[in-house]
Amino acid sequence: MADYQTMRRPMTGARTAEIDEGLRAHMNKVYGLMSVGMVLTGGVAWAVGTSPALLSIFRDPVTMSPNILGWIVMFAPLVMVFGLAGMINRMSAATANLVFYAFAAVMGLSISWIFAVFTGISIAQTFFVTAIAFAGLSLYGYTTKKDLSGWGTFLIMGVIGLIVAMIVNIFLQSPAIMFAVSVLGVLIFAALTAYDTQAIKNEYIEHAAHGDREWLEKSAIMGALRLYLDFINMFMFLLQFLGNRE
């Protein structure tokens, strides 16, 4: 029995090391895809937001109020994200990759107005603050031994509440509601960053033994989408506090 245990330990240790190495590669892919999506979003937003001719296609150049096409672009990312999870499961990994990048480009159109409303310096500063906060929260989610899975239901309910409040405030235009939504938005998406990071890590560990390359590819895309949304939303809510208007 002792000999058997001695023989098993190196195999177990090797398998653990293999999973750890695969996990690091998986998380690097998740962050890499997310980063490319962020660059694409930022590029599209800057190109449209700094061009009065392009921005006027979606918004009134004086009041910045969205026209019909602007409303469609504003809500397009929300509609897309609800359909992406089910769609990606039925796509090849290559197609899912392209759909994620298409989503990132549409998101860039949706938020392009910020370059006409806020100063470039304040946008850059807010992005820098968001990046630092995101890195710290994601690192916490990855390294903590605390089980964050219990946060899931509460956070999803919080996101739904935020969406409803933001839609209602489109008609009410209440500064108090906007302030409350921004505060809650920062807190909810900060918590989601840690929660999603741990969830992505745990999902990989649970499925690593199966060696399903197609699942791993698409799982990385879904993980990138989750963290991308956490970053973008945290950035947009922080911009309400840190952004200086033109």
Image (spheres, rainbow, N blue to C red):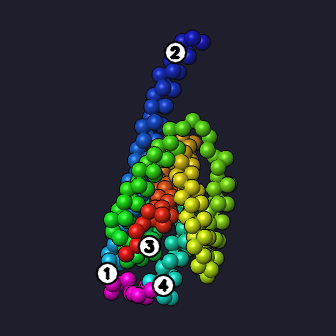
Residue type at the position of mark 4: Pro
N-term mark: 3 or 4: 4
Q: Residue furthest top?
A: 2
Label 1 residue SS: loop
Q: Position of residue 35 (x, y in %)?
A: 38, 57
Distance, label 3 to label 4, CA atoms, is 12 Å
The tag earlier along the polypeptide, 1 or 3, is 1
Hey, what amino acid is under mark 2?
A: Thr
Q: Which quadrant of the structure image shows residue 82?
A: bottom right
Residue 190 x/y as whole percent = 53, 53
- Residue under label 4: 66
**Compared with residue 192, is residue 57 higher up or lower down, i.e. above or below?**
below
What residue sits right under mark 1 in the picture? 51
Q: Nearer the viewer, residue 200 or 183?
A: 183
Question: Magenta stretch: residue 56 in it?
Answer: yes
Q: Identify residue type, mark 1.
A: Ser
Query: In the image, residue 117 lies at what x, y percent?
Result: 40, 76
Which mark, by number, is residue 111? 3
Q: Is residue 217 magenta?
A: no
- Nearer to us in this view, 153 or 241: 241
In front: mark 3 or mark 2?
3
Mark before the other along the chain sequence, 4 or 2: 2
Q: Position of residue 176 (x, y in %)?
A: 60, 70
Q: CA distance from mark 1 to mark 4?
A: 16 Å
Name the residue at 67% across, 55% down: 154
- Residue designated by label 2: 6
Residue type for callout 3: Ile
Task: Please provide the residue range marked out in magenta.
Answer: 51-63
Q: Secondary structure at mark 2?
A: helix
